[in-house]
Image: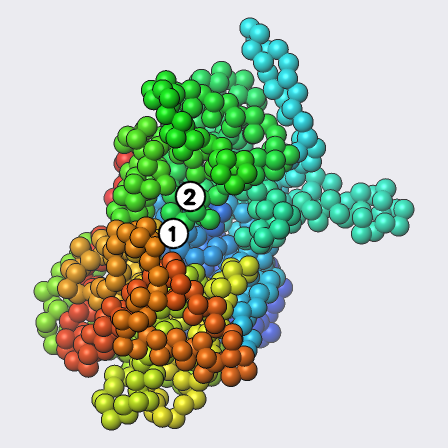
């Protein structure tokens, strides 16, 4: 250890106490001495020491909270992409500098400890990251809340790029344990599957139903504290691990059937192994449904247990409980809550339905048909027979009411039924969530409007006012204060410390947008962040990039509607132009891609391969003189985003208009001074309103124009024929210029654009190319670019997740907010 530098600075009592606590954790919990400890050991010891401070806050909060604590929010989500927690927790607790000093006295840097923490593999993309931001905002706003999800052993896969192809491997984030969580083996709930339903006469001749599952699994609780800003409140993320009630069949083991003895355990624990198991097969579909019911049932049983511990009856449940369904994954909660209230707590059906609707609300995140889950009726009847009975009754009463108000309208009945008949009989989970909730919200103004006009048009007519908008937001603590400390320090210097508590104060930067001195300081922060990203690119994939170049960034899940393909086509067009006209004074550009494709999404994987093939050719071509570099960074996660986001100059938000529900990556990048190139889609529409359309590089068709083209039988060949260069780009890609080992590899991509062009890649290409040209020209004027970057940051105050959660609390949950 090198402690000479630290020894010159006298330690405060707080620093000394932290240092001693870390050493005790290292010695007595981990069994290590300081001389033999590795970075991972220092992280574990530090996290455990910080966790003690969290527990102190939590216990004080429990002691001081009045007995009648009002309403608690229960946020049900299949994903919680929380990322690393050390920096967030110490920042929110105000321990950062004391901890830095304490570790320095031990000869360790804070970054050594922080970077040894693995990312929690509990989510995929925006849906899971939103859930994490929302939980932190609930704690920061003093809203009592629980997040409920699954404690995945491996979570989403670890992405390896081998020869340009995505390969999936298990994510091993729990290999060395999770110091933030508390195992709660005493909190477990029995979850049933299959079996049969018995009926008997109950009180006053009412039939009583008793579900006798054929299989049971235990859901065991693990709690991770969620610390609010300035340690205001500590809430819990409660994750469920699946366990077999009996770890093995001892009789089979003693007979020598050692593998068969463990079959039940393996089947049960598969539920919490991985996030989004492939559902291409019937077995995969069943596992996905088992996951969704597993965590939803555990959550509802748990919140009822907590409610009855404080109250004598479930009759007032809706007065004390707000259940938020984060997308359709937990939609089975409507039927499960009815089962628990009617079968287990013996409430009359009508009262149980009133409570269920009053307590439940549903967030819709997508208009894509594949994301609005449906389940085959035979699967539901086999796996959840009692729930299927309940869904049938909900649907019958729902359709009776529709029929009474709209007699003879068979089209309307088919449209709003909870059972679809189009492709075999399937349960429509989005419809179930809608009918069983008192509020249904979209996540951007455009998305909410499209919900009312498209997927839920008829239900919106039956339940006017049920659909409301709650535009997404991001945690400024994570996405500015923690990932961009240089910018945060600059903002505190010019606006004052109140900017840390009042995101709206960012608007004051507008007065400094033309101040050359401030522009210089703003640009210096950006340059330092770009140098850090350039170093990461060099270390991770061996590509050397110029920090002075325009960093053009597209980081998100790989999906055709997000149009990474459009970005790659423009990259090829730029590459060909640079080779054809070397005498032009080109703007240097670094294209940064990162994101994962679903394991079974072969077209998305092919787009990754194309991006990597283009990168291989471009990066090795001396004729472009290093003016264009392409980098695909593997295994995108929260920690990667925390390096990429602060370094971005240009933020790619180029989804097909009308298909991105909201987006939160657009908010993170703009907050950190990136200019947006994008379509008017999702929350980019509202960003344009708050920042000013003239400060974004907007292009492409509107949502209405996309719908019109599709309705009129649009063919991409029309756009290709009218474009000066798109045909040449597609000929190069389809002809094997970037795939000399397989000339036909990308012919399916090219053919899809020539034909229906469903995602309007060909239709928007020329408009996108023009917007890219405008961005490159502006970047050549540093003063003008810096002005735009400042104005983008200045306009982002409204997009805080605190604002989003305050709106949920006021308009949907009915809970007070402490500012």
* Residue that label 2 marks: 326
Does residue 798 appear to the left or right of 202 in the view shown?
Answer: left
Question: Going 45% across and 59% down the picture, which residue do you hit?
Answer: 83
Residue 263 on image: x %, y %: 75, 47
Q: Is residue 262 above or below residue 545?
A: above
**Quadrant of the image occupied by residue 25:** bottom right
Q: Is residue 187 above or below residue 392?
A: below
Q: Is residue 809 or residue 13 the one in the foreground?
A: 809
Q: Is residue 805 or residue 777 the one in the foreground?
A: 777
**Quadrant of the image occupied by residue 719:** bottom left
| Quadrant that contains the C terminus | top left
Q: Estimate how packed mark 1 is, as few (under 14), some (14 to 19) or many (20 or more) residues with alpha carbons within 10 Å.
A: many
Residue 715 on image: x %, y %: 35, 61
Q: Is residue 674 or residue 600 the one in the foreground?
A: 600
Q: Is residue 277 above or below residue 424?
A: below
Res 108 label: none
Q: Is residue 106 or residue 583 the one in the foreground?
A: 583
Query: N-terminal of the two: label 2 or label 1?
Result: 1
Question: Going 64% across and 48% down the picture, which residue do you hit?
Answer: 283
Question: Going 48% across and 68% down the picture, which residue do you hit?
Answer: 748
Instruction: Residue at the far top: name it.
Output: 204
Question: Going 63% across and 22% down the picture, which residue do you hit?
Answer: 210
Q: Say if residue 298 shows up in the picture.
A: no
Res 130 label: 1
Does residue 733 appear to the left or right of 468 in the view shown?
Answer: right
Q: Give the CA distance from mark 2 to mark 1.
A: 10 Å
**Quadrant of the image occupied by residue 290:** top right
Residue 142 on image: x %, y %: 33, 42
Could you tell me if the residues under marks 2 and 1 are in contact, i.e. CB atoms within 8 Å? yes
Q: Estimate how packed mark 2 is, as few (under 14), some (14 to 19) or many (20 or more) residues with alpha carbons within 10 Å.
A: many
Q: Say if residue 77 shows up in the picture.
A: yes
Residue 236 on image: x %, y %: 46, 44
């Amino acid at each position: 250890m090198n402690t000479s530098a630290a020894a010159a600075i006298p330690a405060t009592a707080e620093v000394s106490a932290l240092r001693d606590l870390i050493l005790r954790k290292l010695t007595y919990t981990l069994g290590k001495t300081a001389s033999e400890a590795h970075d991972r050991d220092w992280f574990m010891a530090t996290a455990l020491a910080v966790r003690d401070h969290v527990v102190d806050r939590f216990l004080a909060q429990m002691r001081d909270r009045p007995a009648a604590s009002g309403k608690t929010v229960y946020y049900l989500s299949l994903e919680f992409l929380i990322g690393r927690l050390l920096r967030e927790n110490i920042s929110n607790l105000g321990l950062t500098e004391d901890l830095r000093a304490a570790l320095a006295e031990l000869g360790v840097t804070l970054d050594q400890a922080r970077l040894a923490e693995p990312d929690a593999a509990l989510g995929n993309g925006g849906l899971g990251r939103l859930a994490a931001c929302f939980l932190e905002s609930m704690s920061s706003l003093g809203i009592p809340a629980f997040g409920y999800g699954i404690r995945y052993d491996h979570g989403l896969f670890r992405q390896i790029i081998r020869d340009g192809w995505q390969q999936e491997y298990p994510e091993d984030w729990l290999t060395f344990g999770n110091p933030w969580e508390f195992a709660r083996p005493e909190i477990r709930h029995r979850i049933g599957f299959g079996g049969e339903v018995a009926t008997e006469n109950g009180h006053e001749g009412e039939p009583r139903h008793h579900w006798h599952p054929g299989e049971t699994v235990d859901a065991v609780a693990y709690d991770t504290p969620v610390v609010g800003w300035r340690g205001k409140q500590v809430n819990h993320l409660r994750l469920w691990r699946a366990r077999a009630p009996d770890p093995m069949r001892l009789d089979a083991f003693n007979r020598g059937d050692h593998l068969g003895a463990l079959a039940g355990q393996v089947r049960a624990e598969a539920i919490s192994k991985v996030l989004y198991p492939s559902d291409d097969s019937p077995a995969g579909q069943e596992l996905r449904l088992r996951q969704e019911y597993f965590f939803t049932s555990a959550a509802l049983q748990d919140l009822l247990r907590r409610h009855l511990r404080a109250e004598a009856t479930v009759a007032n449940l809706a007065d004390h409980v707000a259940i938020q369904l984060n997308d359709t994954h937990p939609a089975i909660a409507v039927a499960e809550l009815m089962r628990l209230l009617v079968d287990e707590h013996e409430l009359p059906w009508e009262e149980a339905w009133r409570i269920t609707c009053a307590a439940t609300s549903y967030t819709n995140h997508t208009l894509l048909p594949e994301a609005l889950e449906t389940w085959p009726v035979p699967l539901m009847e086999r796996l959840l027979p009692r729930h299927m009975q309940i869904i049938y009754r909900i649907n019958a009463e729902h359709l009776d009411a529709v029929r009474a108000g709209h007699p003879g309208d068979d089209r309307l009945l088919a449209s709003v039924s909870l059972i679809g008949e189009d492709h075999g009989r399937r349960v429509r989970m989005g419809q179930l969530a809608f009918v069983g909730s008192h509020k249904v919200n979209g996540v951007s103004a455009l998305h909410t409007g499209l919900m009312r006009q498209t997927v839920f048009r008829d239900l919106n007519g039956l339940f006017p006012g049920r659909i409301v908008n709650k535009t997404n937001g991001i945690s400024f603590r994570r996405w500015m204060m923690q990932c961009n400390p240089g910018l945060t320090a600059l903002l505190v210097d010019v606006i004052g410390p109140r900017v840390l508590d009042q995101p709206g104060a960012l608007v004051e930067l507008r007065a400094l947008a033309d101040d050359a001195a401030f522009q210089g300081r703003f640009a210096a922060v950006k340059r330092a962040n770009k140098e850090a990203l350039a170093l990461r690119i060099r270390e991770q994939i061996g590509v050397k990039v110029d920090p002075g170049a325009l960093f053009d960034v597209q980081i998100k899940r790989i999906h055709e509607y997000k149009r990474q393909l459009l970005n790659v086509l423009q990259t090829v067009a730029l590459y060909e132009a640079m080779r054809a006209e070397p005498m032009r004074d080109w703007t240097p550009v670094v294209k940064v891609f990162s994101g994962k494709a679903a394991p079974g999404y072969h077209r998305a994987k092919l787009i990754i391969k194309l991006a990597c093939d283009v990168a291989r050719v471009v990066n090795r071509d001396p004729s472009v003189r290093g003016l264009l570099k392409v980098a695909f960074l593997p295994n995108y996660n929260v920690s990667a985003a925390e390096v990429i986001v602060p370094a971005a100059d240009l933020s790619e938000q180029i989804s097909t208009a009308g298909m991105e529900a909201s987006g939160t990556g657009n908010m993170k990048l703009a907050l950190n001074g990136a200019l947006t190139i994008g379509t008017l889609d999702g929350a980019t529409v509202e960003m344009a309103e708050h920042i000013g359309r003239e400060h974004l590089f907007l292009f492409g068709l509107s949502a209405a124009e996309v719908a019109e083209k599709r309705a009129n039988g649009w063919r991409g060949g029309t756009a290709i024929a009218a474009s000066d260069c798109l045909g040449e780009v597609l000929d190069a890609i389809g002809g094997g210029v970037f795939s000399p080992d397989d000339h036909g590899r990308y012919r399916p991509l090219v053919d899809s654009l020539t034909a229906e062009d469903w995602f309007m890649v060909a239709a928007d290409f020329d408009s996108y190319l023009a917007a890219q040209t405008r961005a490159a020209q502006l970047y050549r004027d540093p003063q003008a670019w810096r002005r735009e970057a400042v104005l983008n940051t200045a306009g982002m105050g409204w997009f805080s997740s605190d604002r989003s959660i305050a709106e949920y609390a006021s308009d949907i949950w009915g809970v007070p907010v402490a500012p």
